[in-house]
Amino acid sequence: MVMECSGNAADKKRGERIFGRRVKQMQLTKTLEKATSGKGGAGGTAALEVRRKEVKYFVSRPDFLAAESVLDKALERDSHDRGKGYFIRSLYFDTLENRAFEEKMAGVERRKKIRLRIYDLKAKMAKLEIKNKVNDCILKESIWVKREDAERLQSGDFEALLEYEGGIARKAYAELRKYCYRPVVVIDYIRHAFVYPFNNTRITFDTNLKANNIDLNMFDSEIFMKPLLDRGLAVMEVKFDGFIPGIVRELAAIKSCNSAISKYCIGRLDNRLSWI
């Protein structure tokens, strides 16, 4: 079955009307939330565990532009986003049997992915992350590793993790060795991110999604990255604790292709998504 996402000026106007009705309410709610809860956020480079829920949507470029215009007036951007989005590149690992890929494609409820992530090709540190998922609930366990150790990991030398203290490093090492993980695909994109303090809500739009599953040096600026999504599609993700605030739910109700999206699987499929 083929589903088409709208992509014309009328969609943009409809999106602006939907979001525009809520701008004043969102601004007022934002002020009240900051007065009672303070500005949310996290920082530091220590081992980190994040538990929350996550839903994803495909959105057309007109819908993305309409949402971005309104959210810029009502919410704050993520601290990494200076107004034009920020770069993310991830190197994903999978087993010899492609367990992570196959479980996602089969809709297995409990599954996990392991990846290295950087935000700058010249970065001196990389984030190693285990993303555990049960339906729409996620647990991310991550540690920061030195660039040279990240390079060892992407070459299959997992012994680098034994130089780090803490349970997450040991868990990642055991998982990578036990199930014979190896790097399989590099994915990058530009992320536009907004934060809403109630229920620790975060709204992101990932654009310009690209992949390479042959050249797997994530620090190489010269590797060819193949565009993956047709028709200017973006991936919208809403992450939250407990439940989606009503205001954000209105945002999620824009005309979009609702899907169990995996940027990892899109990159592994290695073809344009005419099936969206």
Image (cartoon, helix red, strand yellow):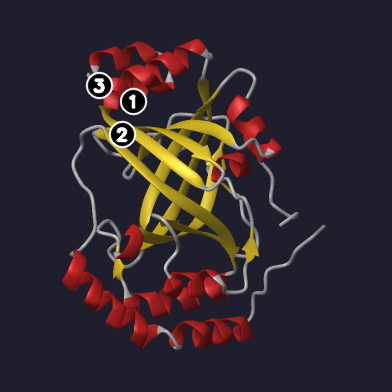
Give the mark toward the camera: 3 or 1: 3
Q: Residues within 10 Å of mark 3 (few under 14, many from 20)?
A: few
Badge 2 or badge 1: first in the primary sequence: 2
Given residues 231 and 258, the one toward you in this image is 258
- Residue 113 vs 58, above or below: the answer is above
User: What secondary structure is found at the residue carrying circle 1?
Assistant: helix
Picture residue at 34% right of the left edge, 11% below the top: 159
Given residues 1 and 91, the one toward you in this image is 1
Say what amino acid the circle numbered 1 marks: Ala
Q: Residues within 10 Å of mark 2 (few under 14, many from 20)?
A: many
The quadrant in which the C terminus is found is bottom right
- Residue 258 vs 215, above or below: the answer is below
The quadrant in which the N terminus is found is bottom right
Say what amino acid the circle numbered 3 marks: Gly
Picture residue at 58% right of the left edge, 85% below the top: 14
Whole-Å distance between the Cαs marked 2 and 1?
Answer: 6 Å
Q: Which mark is residue 126?
A: 2
Say what amino acid the circle numbered 2 marks: Ala
Q: Identify residue for label 3.
A: 166
Give percent across and percent down for residue 57: 57, 60
Badge 2 or badge 3: first in the primary sequence: 2
Give percent across and percent down for residue 95: 57, 20
Give percent across and percent down for residue 31: 23, 78
